[in-house]
Amino acid sequence: MTADVDLDGLTYLLPELSTREAFAELEAARRAAEQTPPKFTIIPEPEFPHMWPHPKGGIARFPCALGCGWAHEHDSFADDPEPISLPLSAGAEEIGRIFGERAERRAARVRASVEDAIRSHFADEHPGQEPPERRIA
Ligand SMILES: [Zn+2]
């Protein structure tokens, strides 16, 4: 049995929607998306000045949103101090959960580190000015 056969079998089990029902589902999804509060960040879009396999290929640069020339550099290849620890009895679902939670913790640490650097830069070089926010969702 191939993955395509599995997908065909699953698709067969789904109820067939009329155009009206499909439109109602799309409308409901659109309304739900509108009601989700927007998310903002002070972290600018990163730049990746060096591509792998360059020795600095893991460097992500977060330039000052005011264009003063400063940038916070984060080496995404270097940081990962948290050891990976898996129980020997862990199944695929638990392994996935452990890696997912670990990735969330790492992402939160990186975000906090970049935000701290940006706030510190603004306090030193652009006193009295808040870092501008951009919408991310
Ligand atoms: Zn600046």
Image (spheres, grey):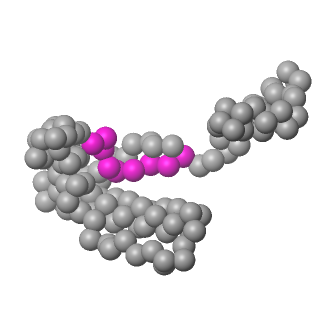
In the image, is residue 41 part of the stretch drawn in magenta?
yes
Percent coordinates x, y for residue 72 in the rendering = 18, 52
Q: Hey, which quadrant is residue 16 in on the image?
A: top right
Residue 108 showing in the rendered view = no
Q: Residue at x 19, y 40 (%)?
A: 52
Please report the residue visible at 39 percent of the width from the left and 50 percent of the height from the top: 41
Is residue 134 or residue 2 the one in the foreground?
A: 2
Left or right of 108 in this view: 76? left
Query: Where residue 25 sits: x, y (%)?
Result: 79, 34
State the residue in front, 134 or 101.
101
Judge left or right: residue 58 versus residue 89: left
The span shown in magenta is 38-46
Q: Residue at x 65, y 36 (%)?
A: 2
* Quadrant where the N terminus is found in the figure: top right
Residue 38 at x, y percent in the picture: 54, 46
Left or right: 98, with 57 as reference point: right
Q: Is residue 69 magenta?
A: no
Query: Is any part of residue 23 visible from this angle?
Result: yes
Q: Could you tell me what secondary structure mostly forms the magenta stretch?
A: loop
